[in-house]
Image: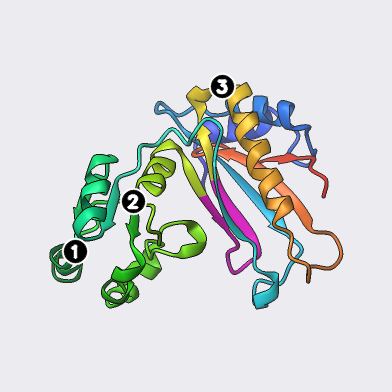
Amino acid sequence: MKYGKKYTDSVKAFDLTKQYEVNEAMNVVLETAKAKFDETIEMHVRLGVDPRQADQQVRGVLVLPHGTGKTKRVLVIAKGAKADAAQAAGADFVGAEELIAKIQNENWFDFDVMITTPDMMGMVGRIGRVLGPKGLMPNPKSGTVTMDVEKAIKEVKAGKVEYRLDKTAIIHCPIGKKSFGQEKLVENFTALYDAIVKAKPAAAKGQYVKSVTIASTMGPGVKVAAKA
């Protein structure tokens, strides 16, 4: 794999093998984020769990102290008073059968999060096969299947993130934008890291957090010395 000059220069600017304290690591990430756009800063946590075991899953949601820097488009599938409440709370799209049909027939995905009321899950379930692979299927655990649609919308708009294990036992999650600066990014990092540590499954044995890395969209990964 070939890397550009900015990337190779960035790699030379720090020790790839060293584990840095979080403040120092964040400084390195910001200094090596040299793209012309406002890069997203991501956190990658490798855990000592077996993602194939149901009792070792790690998943949760939280509202980052300073949000993610991205305004998410929210689709709410609801009827009646709940649809009215969703409109008032600032949902970008609100509807029922007609929007389900639009997704199904027109491959329409101009939204980032789908929220629905429990009574509409039967209808939403019909398009689960297309929503699931895109990570858009509503789920009670992530707060996207709820009667309190107003709260759900406000949390998403405020910067709620969902973290979950992938098949290789790694959690990948955005923690903000380069423009946030070191202090806000470290606070978001700490909030997410603490949430992941608290979500440790009872069935997990041995070292829980194997490694933590932070990186910008186009920059190299910087290792963080994190204990758990």
Are the two marked residues, 1 and 2, in contact with CB atoms closer than 8 angstroms?
no
Chain part drawn in magenta: 162-173
Q: Where residue 57 sits in the image (x, y, percent)?
A: 65, 68
Are the two marked residues, 1 and 3, in contact with CB atoms closer than 8 angstroms?
no
Q: Which residue is mark 3?
A: 181
Q: Tell me the crowding category of disc 2: few under 14, some 14 to 19, or many 20 or more residues within 10 angstroms, Cα based.
A: some
Viewer-nearest of discs 1 and 2: 1
Q: Residue furthest right?
A: 206
Q: Tell me the crowding category of disc 1: few under 14, some 14 to 19, or many 20 or more residues within 10 angstroms, Cα based.
A: some
Q: Where residue 200 sits in the image (x, y, percent)?
A: 74, 59
Are the two marked residues, 3 and 2, in contact with CB atoms closer than 8 angstroms?
no
Q: Which mark is residue 112?
A: 2
Q: Which mark is residue 7?
A: none
Residue 221 can be seen, yes or no: no
Taking the image as shown, residue 137 lies to the left or right of residue 19, namely left
Gap in angstroms between the C-alphas marked 3 and 2? 25 Å
Let me know if residue 24 is in the magenta part.
no
Say above or below: 171 vs 159.
Answer: below
Viewer-nearest of discs 1 and 3: 1
Q: Where residue 60 sits in the image (x, y, percent)?
A: 58, 56
> Total marks drawn?
3
Say above or below: 154 vs 113.
Answer: above
Location of residue 167 by image quarter: bottom right
Q: Residue at x 40, y 59 (%)?
A: 146
Q: Which mark is residue 96?
A: 1
Taking the image as shown, residue 39 lies to the left or right of residue 185, namely left
Q: Where residue 87 sits in the image (x, y, percent)?
A: 22, 45
- Under tag 1, what secondary structure? loop
Say above or below: 181 vs 94.
Answer: above
- Under tag 2, what secondary structure? loop
Kind of residue at badge 3: Gly
Taking the image as shown, residue 140 lies to the left or right of residue 228, namely left
